[in-house]
Amino acid sequence: MKKLPPIQKILEAYTAIVDKHVNLTKDQAEVTSSNGAKTYTVDWDDDVYHSNDNASYWQGYAGYPVIAVLMLQEKLPYDQKLANNFANVNWNEINKKYKRNYVKAAADVIEEKGLDEEKVMAELERVYADLKQLPITIKRGSLRPPKVKK
């Protein structure tokens, strides 16, 4: 992977999985945003992943929908017990509040949930280390545009 996401995107992937916002099939996934406003598509062919979420499309790194898919495909570690703590987090709202400062946004949620930030970050570092080693390519876009609910 040429460009890595902010480590805090792993928490957004946890929320997507725990809240059952990921519908995974054999060759694609649909991932609904934390506020339910958009649905993104993640496609893959071997180790090439395409996604139309904003991070993957505009920033060129694996956004939380891709990270969630990689976890469900068992290519990245997934700690169910830790992930359960991030159920029902509206990351869209929190990221707006902190003007996309993902460090502050994650710290706020971790504090609000009463979690040990050092322990959470240690697990994120473990997942991130594995993410760095994955021989995957992130391609901009998907075969479909994001679905916007009206």
Image (cartoon, rainbow, N blue to C red):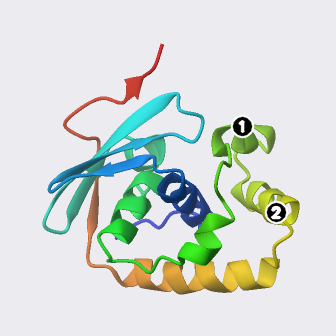
SS category of the residue bearing label 2: loop
Identify the image quadrant of the N terminus.
bottom left
Q: Residue at x 68, y 49 (%)?
A: 89
Between 35 and 80, the one lying in front of the other is 80
Between 43 and 26, the one lying in front of the other is 26
Query: CB under 8 Å between callouts 2 and 1?
Result: no
Q: Residue at x 20, y 53 (%)?
A: 25
SS category of the residue bearing label 1: helix
Look at mark 1 in the image and give the residue it sits on.
93
The x, y position of residue 37, in whole percent, is 52, 27
The x, y position of residue 9, in whole percent, is 57, 60
The x, y position of residue 109, in whole percent, is 79, 58
Which quadrant of the view contains residue 31? Answer: top left
Label 2: how many Cα within 10 Å (few below 14, some 14–19, many 20+)? few
Look at mark 2 in the image and give the residue it sits on.
113
- What type is the residue that disc 2 sits on? Lys
Label 1: how many Cα within 10 Å (few below 14, some 14–19, many 20+)? few
In this image, 104 relative to 57: left or right? right
Between 97 and 138, the one lying in front of the other is 97
Q: Residue at x 39, y 70 (%)?
A: 71
In this image, 116 relative to 38: left or right? right
Q: Is residue 58 above or below residue 129?
A: above
Q: Residue at x 51, y 63 (%)?
A: 5
Q: Is residue 135 above or below residue 71?
A: below
Residue 33, labelled with which disc? Answer: none
In this image, 114 relative to 5: left or right? right
The x, y position of residue 14, in whole percent, is 55, 62
- What type is the residue that disc 1 sits on? Glu
Tell which tag, 2 or 1, sits nearer the viewer.
2
The first of marks 2 and 1 along the sequence is 1
Which quadrant of the view contains residue 85? Answer: bottom right
Count of all numbered marks drawn on residues in the image: 2
